[in-house]
Image (tube, rainbow, N blue to C red):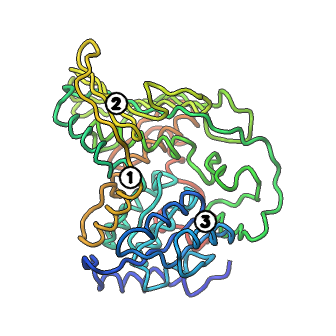
Amino acid sequence: MKQTSLGATGAAAFAAAASGRQALGANERLAVGVIGCGGRGRGLAREFAHLENVRVTHVCDADASRAEKARQAAGAERVVPDMRQILDEKSVDAVVIATPDDWHAPAAILACEAGKHVYVEKPCSHNIREGRLMVEAARHHKRVMQVGTQSRSAAVIQKGIQKLHEGVIGQVLVAKAWDSQRRANIGHRQPSDPPPGCNYDLWVGPAAWMPFQSNRFHYTWHWWYNFGTGDIGNDGVHDIDIARWGLGVETHPSIVSGHGSKLHFDDDQQFPDTQYITYEYPGDGKIGSRRLLVYEQRIWSPYRQEGHENGNAFYGTEGVMVLGKKDGWQIFGPRNKLIAEEKGGYNNKDHALDFVEAIHSGGRPNADIEIGHLSATLSHLGNIVSRVGRTVRFDPKTEQITGDEEANRLVRREYRKDHWAVPKGVY
């Protein structure tokens, strides 16, 4: 692709950001550009456009028809095909990134370098190394970076987690997250020409090149190693994040084991439709300090588990909490006695508003990038265990898998050679 003046975004924009404002005044109107205009991007564009003192100025997508729909949904001023046109626009204060997963980190890092604050959809990264680089970019450039795990801004979930941390069910030793729902079979396809109006080269971006194929394009990219992170990264990461939050662990696990494979779908998708993954947090190694997080996935099941399609259970020494991010929570004591419950769930507006308020205050948002990185890493480690078919040992400090070269290669990914969006430091 032709290199434009936007290639200078990094150094020039950083200089401007470093010397410019760190937080907006309370009454200043925030100008937002939306990058990625599928269903999630359009919904976010509409949500931000409805917030007070926020205007969506630009929308961007490699598919022109999607970009136009987002423009209409948000009343945006401009449609652009290339995100660099947003990053070079000095009037834009923040970007919303709702692209395929492989674009999340490259776009977010470029945005920080360009002096923009970032709202990036979950999972924040495509792989573990990219997640760390996102944290470093946000801190170095002093930008707010919010991850789209909306439960972090939901009052009912915040209250439930607070009760756990206050000891309502004693010591929480085990937390479980489940993703139990019915997905579609994506079939078997062959490469073909991309649809009219789509710049497929831009769509692929810095990922290793693959020819267009209809069942690895809009939405179905989730199920391909090159572009997505499977359902553990797509939907599962929401509940994994809540599980980690309630368990009270603020580091990476040291041992990850389990099973991941296709038990149901006969189609082209590469990621497992079924996963059972366990994450061990050793603490100081003593009894009472160790913690276990469990993830279950069945994306061929039409049933609700423990009352929730996707949800969480927290097992304490004095009781159990069952939580659904859309439905609220229940706390049970010994012999299944109901102790307390609260109905309710998350909404996108609260999370978007929290992002805007963090920009105005200069503080950290509820789902700060470091929180997002810790939770996304669990999704990535679950996929690594599934791909290599064995337990891995992970060093929380170096963020490397030890004693297993094959598995450790999956901590990062391959990129298109010399592509303008490949983040520095990925190798």
Where is residue 136? Give x, y as percent.
Answer: 36, 64
* Looking at the image, residue 114 lies above or below residue 217: below
Q: Amino acid at mark 1?
A: Gly
Disc 3: which residue? 206
Q: What number is the disc on residue 372?
A: 1
Where is residue 369? Give x, y as percent.
Answer: 36, 58
Is disc 1 placed on a helix, strand or loop? helix
Q: Quadrant of the N terminus?
A: bottom right
* Looking at the image, residue 405 lies above or below residue 37: above
Query: Is there any visible trace of residue 88 in the rendered image?
Result: yes
The mark that comes first in sequence, 2 or 3, is 2
Q: Residue at x 21, y 26 (%)?
A: 169
The mark that comes first in sequence, 2 or 1, is 2
* Looking at the image, residue 55 lies above or below residue 144: below
Q: Is residue 334 left or right of residue 118?
A: left
* Looking at the image, residue 180 lies above or below residue 370: above
Query: Is there any visible trace of residue 253 in the rendered image?
Result: no
Q: Tell me the distance, in whole angstroms, between the alpha carbons under discs 2 and 3.
A: 36 Å
Image quarter of residue 22: bottom left
Q: Tell me the distance, in whole angstroms, between the alpha carbons under discs 1 and 3.
A: 22 Å
Q: Amino acid at mark 2?
A: Ala
Q: Amino acid at mark 3?
A: Pro
The mark that comes first in sequence, 1 or 3, is 3
**Looking at this view, is 25 or 192 the one in front?**
25
Disc 2: which residue? 175
Where is residue 311? Give x, y as percent.
Answer: 42, 34
